[in-house]
């Protein structure tokens, strides 16, 4: 019986992929994904059928992948990061009936960025996407308010695009109600990929023009500090 693998590629480089992800792609006869993601693993695609769609083609990709499995072909549908975090695992499981599905975990952008910054999410944290394409902005605002009030370290995904350049500034204005102006913030662009950039600053000194959709911001909690060139959020160990 054919299987549908829902694969998290990690940040995009093979060196950050799990062995299970590599194995799933090697087993698959068909690879389905957003074109940019497929290009990240082009050296692994020899002899495979490759199906790509553009941005916002998520449901179409899921349907195509499911059809390939129903025709007896092992298939991988790919996401960057982890497929269960803003990826394809949810819609696949909602749509799939009568086929074998395996979700293969991957390294999220948040974890890749955190590793480059040091240890900014050593304690409780949350991730919030600032994309309001699928989630109303009013809901995002409420989540930012709750995360700020709870003193979480916060990873911000999809922080700033050409279509919504103001969302990051609005989010930071909300968080400044709860966080001190000198709270450390790590800005990582292309975490784990070519073109990587990394900046540590404070929440009141973010250079918004540095931020785009390939960027993850990690905002510290009230205990986060900078040591040398690393962010640290203590968990409470007696050092």
Image (cartoon, rainbow, N blue to C red):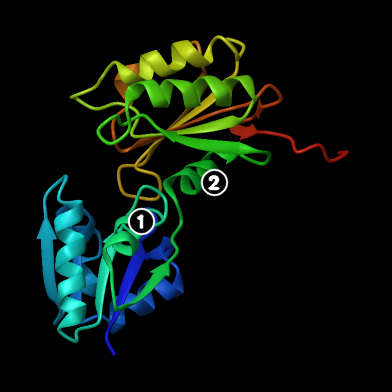
Quadrant of residue 49 within the rendered picture: bottom left
Crowd rating for badge 1 (residues with CA inside 10 Å; few <14, some 14–19, many 20+) = some
Q: Position of residue 44 (x, y in %)?
A: 24, 73
Is 83 on the left or on the right of 72, as rendered? right
Q: Which mark is residue 90?
A: 1
Numbered disc total: 2
In the picture, the disc for residue 115 is 2
Mark number, residue 177: none
Secondary structure, mark 1, is helix
Which residue is at 68% across, 33% downward? 233
Residue in the foreground of this view, choosing between 95 and 80? 95
Dot 2 falls on a residue whose secondary structure is helix
- First of labels 1, 2 by sequence position: 1
Q: CA separation, marks 1 and 2?
A: 26 Å
Can residue 153 be seen in this snapshot? yes
Against 147, residue 102 (above or below) is below
Q: Quadrant of residue 32?
A: bottom left
Q: Nearer the viewer, mark 1 or mark 2?
A: 1
Most extreme residue toward the right is 238
The residue that appears at 17% across and 60% down in the rendered structure is: 61
Q: Residue 172 at what x, y percent from top left?
A: 45, 16
Q: Residue at x 37, y 53 (%)?
A: 11
Residue 201 drawn above or below residue 237: above
Where is 45 relative to 179, above or below? below
């Amino acid at each position: 019986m054919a299987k549908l693998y829902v694969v998290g590629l990690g940040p995009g480089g093979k060196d950050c992929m799990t062995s299970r992800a590599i194995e799933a792609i090697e087993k698959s006869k068909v690879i389905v994904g957003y074109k940019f993601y497929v290009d990240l693993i082009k050296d692994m695609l020899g002899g495979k059928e490759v199906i790509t769609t553009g941005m916002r083609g998520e449901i179409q990709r899921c349907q195509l992948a499911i059809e390939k499995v129903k025709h007896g072909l092992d298939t991988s549908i790919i996401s960057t990061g982890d497929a269960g975090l803003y990826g394809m695992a949810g819609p696949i499981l909602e749509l799939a009936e009568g086929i074998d599905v395996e979700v293969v975990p991957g390294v999220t952008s948040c974890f890749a960025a955190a590793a480059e910054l040091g240890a900014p999410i050593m304690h409780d944290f949350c991730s919030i996407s600032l994309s309001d394409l699928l989630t109303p902005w009013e809901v995002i605002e409420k989540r930012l308010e709750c995360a700020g009030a709870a003193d979480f370290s916060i990873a911000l995904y999809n922080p700033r695009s050409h279509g919504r350049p103001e969302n990051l500034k609005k989010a930071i204005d909300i968080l400044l109600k709860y966080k001190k102006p000198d709270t450390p913030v790590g800005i990582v662009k292309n975490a784990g990929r070519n073109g990587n950039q990394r900046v540590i600053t404070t929440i009141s000194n973010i250079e918004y023009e540095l931020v785009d959709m390939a960027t993850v911001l990690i905002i510290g909690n009230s205990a986060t500090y900078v040591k040398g060139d690393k962010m640290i959020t203590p968990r409470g160990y007696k050092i």
